[in-house]
Amino acid sequence: MPNVRPLSEPLRIKAEKELFEVPERIEEDLASLRIWLGKQPHLKTRTDDQFLVAFLRGCKYSLERAKEKIDLFYSARTSFKEIMADRDPMSTKNLELIRLGVGLPLTNTVTPDGPRIVLIRPGVYEADKYDILDVMRISIMANDIHMIEDDQMMVAGQIGILDLANVTMAHFLQFSPTFVKKITVINQDAMPLRLKGFHYINTPPGFETVYNMFRRFLNEKNRNRLHVHGDNLESLYKHIPQKLLPTEYGGEAGSLKDLTVYWEKKFMEHRDYLMEESKYGTDEKKRPGRPKTEETLFGIDGSFRKLNVD
């Protein structure tokens, strides 16, 4: 039997219906992936069941798509070295950012088989002290934990709430088009996570410029899942009931402080796992055919290299 965590009944039904999961066939599918991975001289990857099944679910059990995504997962990280530079949650800067609670997955979902909701608050970090690269590194580390631990997210997908309260022009200026493209490739194309919706609240002046840049790099399906609410939280509640939000937002999901402490513990529990990731990746010199380069993975046209914010 494969060493994969059993799903709750609502998630099992959803996985079979929407992801085409056939429990009796998982072991065979995992074996097929491992055989393929063993024949890839350029790939050094994790091969445990729970990790690989995340890619099968994220690709609706298309073995070919799962192979492509695993390859991209590691080639993108190998190419974007800065995002993998320091994955120790106990290092000074990482721990400071974790304790700020920039990104906080919420405890409950709208329905038992509903997507995981993640609250993102970039306004809590000082733009002159931290760089968006450091913040995104923490976000990717959190997603790595979700991949092996959060069945809700891996089967039902995720919904983001981006609260832009206290975000300044200095925050926006950290988003170069090149960086946005790299992060989009890593999160949208290389991770086996499915975006089910993204909601922007408390949007400040200058938001439109960065928003339009993000939209440009998203695929059409994800572009259609973006919702801008401004300061109108009643509009947000039509999608996400207020009671699911933290107490500071008038909800029942616990305080922001408690959620942050909970996630600090999670990072510490998975410290070895997160740091081990530096062992894995691609050796492009050994790749059959053409190597994947930063340009082929992340290339953007020359007319869109500078961010202009009025």
Image: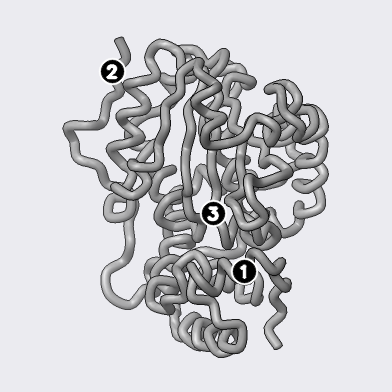
Which quadrant would the C terminus be assigned to in this image?
top left
Q: Foreground residue, 207 or 71?
A: 207
Chosen colour scheme:
one colour
Residue at mark 1:
51
Label 2 or label 1, whichever lies nearer to me, is 1
Mark 1 closeness class: few <14, some 14–19, many ≥20 residues within 10 Å: some
Alpha-carbon neighbours of circle 3 within 10 Å: few (<14), some, or many (≥20)?
many
Closer to the eye: label 3 or 2? 3
Q: In the figure, is residue 165 to the left or right of 221?
A: right
98 is higher (above) or lower (below) than 51:
above
* Mark 3 vs mark 1, CA separation in Å: 16 Å
Q: Where is residue 281 in the image (x, y as percent from the top left)?
A: 51, 64
Q: Determine whether label 2 and label 1 are within 8 Å by CB.
A: no
Q: Which labelled disc corresponds to residue 308? A: 2
- The percent position of residue 116, horizontal first and vertical second, equals 62, 48
Which amino acid type corresponds to the residue marked 1 in the rendered image?
A: Phe
Residue 157, labelled with which disc?
A: 3
Instruction: Calculate the distance from the C-alpha at mark 3 to the C-alpha at mark 2.
Output: 33 Å
Image quarter of residue 284: bottom left
Q: What element carries label 3?
A: loop
In the rendered image, which quarter contains the N terminus? bottom right
Is 290 left or right of 243, judged from the image as shown? Answer: left
Q: Residue at x 71, y 59 (%)?
A: 273
